[in-house]
Amino acid sequence: MGNGKRTDRPGKPLAQGQQGRVVAAFGRRFLVELADGAVLDCVSSGKKRGIACGDRVGLKLTGPGQGVIEHVVARTSLLYRSDPFRTKVIAANVTQVVVVLAAVPSFYEDLLNRCLIAAESTHIRALIVLNKCDLTEETEQAREQLRLYRGLGYPLVELSAKRDVGPLRPHLEGHTSVLVGQSGMGKSSIINALLPEAAAETREFSQALDSGRHTTTYTRLYHLDRESHIIDSPGLQEFGLHHLRPDEIDHAFVEFRPYLGRCKFSNCRHVSEPGCAVRQAATEGRINGRRLAAYLRLIGAKTA
Ligand SMILES: Nc1nc2c(ncn2[C@@H]2O[C@H](COP(=O)(O)OP(=O)(O)OP(=O)(O)O)[C@@H](O)[C@H]2O)c(=O)[nH]1
Ligand SMILES: [Mg+2]
Ligand SMILES: [Zn+2]
């Protein structure tokens, strides 16, 4: 399954079916919300794979409160990750990726970069949240580390889910946002702070769907208002980008763009080729060395 793949008859309602939005995705089980607010417990028909939270779907009712998803309406976006063997969808029809970081536990900068690259390559806006700012001492170094990303144009919102999520609210207006990041960064805490009633809902849904673990194990969409929605997702250990071609990765590093097409060789991978405009820019301090190193790790090159 690829990003550009359109799935089944876009927008066409089924004669006896209903349309709804996937508001929770747990393996092959889904909760689908209908226009009247009713939520159905659904499975996917046949071998249909890759249905994501946020997807608009056509479904058939099979019993009280139950249905089968029969098709997926064409998506405006699909955020997903991949390794050489398979693809894992994260969320569909989102307009913003919110990468949630915190100083404690420490975050992996490569994972941040991978989240940003995934967002750029899907043409989704990316926002960085530095949570747990109530831990003032620990946060200082993380703030310093993130200065680079602010310089690249990524909005950085500092907050404490424990104290006040207010600074995040204006950034969510009119967007369908998905919170992504490592486990323990506070994604679900942010959701609960934004939507006090979500705590009860989370417990309710975790009873229906969860295996009883404390961390999030399923993707779940919440409504902030009619136009603004937010998706909580399970913590990521890694963010495989096997599906991206090297030239797509090049373009997803926003600060590389002015130099692309200017290397001596048109297929330059910016590793050690002579006449490389990207490396030249790095040497001159116009591209940060940490980002070039992250790029080289991403394309699997030796950074020696
Ligand atoms: N000090 C402090 N702790 C926080 C804050 N936000 C969350 N935490 C704590 O961080 C821990 C992890 O929070 P969660 O919201 O479960 O993290 P998550 O990102 O949803 O984790 P996964 O679901 O595993 O991906 C919990 O113990 C929270 O109480 C904060 O603003 N300040
Ligand atoms: Mg969580
Ligand atoms: Zn080059």
Image (cartoon, grey):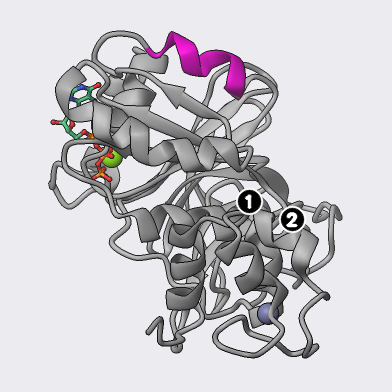
Give the residue type that dot 2 points to.
Arg
Residue 162, compared with residue 240, is above or below; it is above
Whole-percent x and y of residue 298?
A: 47, 75
Toward the viewer: 270 or 11? 270
| Ligand 2 is within 8 Å of the C-beta of the residue at disc 1 | no
- Quadrant showing the N terminus: bottom right
| Pointer 2 with pointer 1, Cβ within 8 A | yes
Give the residue type that dot 1 points to.
Asp
Density class for disc 1 (Cα within 10 Å; few <14, some 14-19, many ≥20) is many
Q: Dot 1 lies on which element?
A: loop
> Magenta segment: does it hold 109?
no
Residue 239, compared with residue 138, is above or below; it is below
Secondary structure mostly seen in the magenta stretch: helix
Count of numbered labels shown in the rendering: 2
- Quadrant showing the C terminus: bottom left
Q: What is the residue that sits farthest to the front in this orientation? A: 284
Residue 282, by quadrant, is: bottom right
User: Measuring 34% from the left and 16% from the top, which residue is drawn there?
Assistant: 193
Toward the viewer: 273 or 20? 273
Density class for disc 2 (Cα within 10 Å; few <14, some 14-19, many ≥20) is some
Q: For this view, does 262 lie left or right of residue 228?
A: right
Q: Which mark is residue 75?
A: 2
Q: Which residues are magenta?
A: 165-171
Q: For this view, does 138 lie left or right of residue 131?
A: left
The reply to whether residue 141 is visible in this rendering is yes
Whole-percent x and y of residue 299?
A: 51, 81
Residue 81, compared with residue 270, is above or below; it is above
User: Measuring 82% from the left and 75% from the top, which residue is drawn there?
Assistant: 262
The reply to whether residue 51 is visible in this rendering is no
Whole-percent x and y of residue 135?
A: 17, 21
Q: Which mark is residue 197?
A: none
The residue to which callout 1 is attached is 55
